[in-house]
């Protein structure tokens, strides 16, 4: 959510309840999203790469192993990542591709091709256009970064299986919705699709 101040979040919750009164029950059960902007874009994007196609638990284990390759307490800088041999990243549990993707991301930040300080000044579309040029970053990774790390308010991650399944159950669909249908169904949530998506994950947790 965009700088999730209390007034902003209250407005989002109120809007969703008006768009679909059923949200009130979800809000009572799960509370409000508690998201905070990250101060380390490199770490956030690297963590998303590590998490690709993994369960939350498996991704957390590998993330900790990668941290232990360095001083163990914090995620490495781009320069430190570049100095870490590919084989040692693989030994931490990363696939061959993901190890290469982390090095590619580190090069992008270290060279200035991606500038952490300016990312938040860009629009969602501009951020996506810049980041997808980095090998290993696709729209799902961009959406997770926008939603959870930059706290942008109107992100609908149409490529996320959890959101798709949540919307399928929420709207009583026979099949998983395709991106275009998801956008149409979520149109009443705008400009707070990020909060709506967060609740779709909660819907899935209740299955």
Image: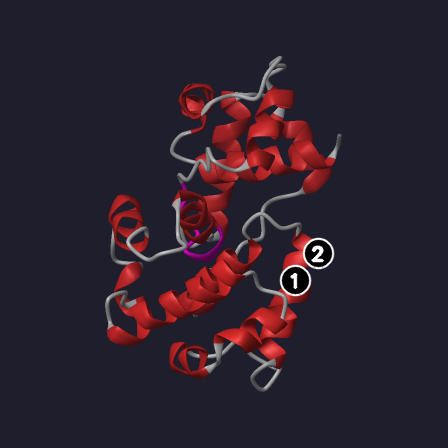
Q: Position of residue 138 (x, y in %)?
A: 39, 47
Residue occupying the far right of the picture: 207
Residue, x 54% and y 59% (percent of image)? Answer: 50
Which numbered circle lies on residue 57?
2
- Residue at image location 45% in from the left, 44% down from the top: 140
| Label 1, label 2: how far apart the Cα atoms are | 5 Å
Q: Which residue is mark 1?
A: 60
Q: Quadrant of the C terminus?
A: top right
Q: Position of residue 134 (x, y in %)?
A: 32, 57
Q: Quadrant of residue 70?
A: bottom right
Residue 77 sits in quarter: bottom left
Q: Is 42 on the left-hand or right-hand side of 113?
A: right
Q: Is residue 170 above or below residue 2?
A: above
Q: Report helix, strand or loop for mark 2.
A: helix
Q: How is the image coloured?
A: secondary structure
Vertical comparison of 23 with 74: above or below: above
Q: Which residues are magenta?
A: 148-153
């Amino acid at each position: 959510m965009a700088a999730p101040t209390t007034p902003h979040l209250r407005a989002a919750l109120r809007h969703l309840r008006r768009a679909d009164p059923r949200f009130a029950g979800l809000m009572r059960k799960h509370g409000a999203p508690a998201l905070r902007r990250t101060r380390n874009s490199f770490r956030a994007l690297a963590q998303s790469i590590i998490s690709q196609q993994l369960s939350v638990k498996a991704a957390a284990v590998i993330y900790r192993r990668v941290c232990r390759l360095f001083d163990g307490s914090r995620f490495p800088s781009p320069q430190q990542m570049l100095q870490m041999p590919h084989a040692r990243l693989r030994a931490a549990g990363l696939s061959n591709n993901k190890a290469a993707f982390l090095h590619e991301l580190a090069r992008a930040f270290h060279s200035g091709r991606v500038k952490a300080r300016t990312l938040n000044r860009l629009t969602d579309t501009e951020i996506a256009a810049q980041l997808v040029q980095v090998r290993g970053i696709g729209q799902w990774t961009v959406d997770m970064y926008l939603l959870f790390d930059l706290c942008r308010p109107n992100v609908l991650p149409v490529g996320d299986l959890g959101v798709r399944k949540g919307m399928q159950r929420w709207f009583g669909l026979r099949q998983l919705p395709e991106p275009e249908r998801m956008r149409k169904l979520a149109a009443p949530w705008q400009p707070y699709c990020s909060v709506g998506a967060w609740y779709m994950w909660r819907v899935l947790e209740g299955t």
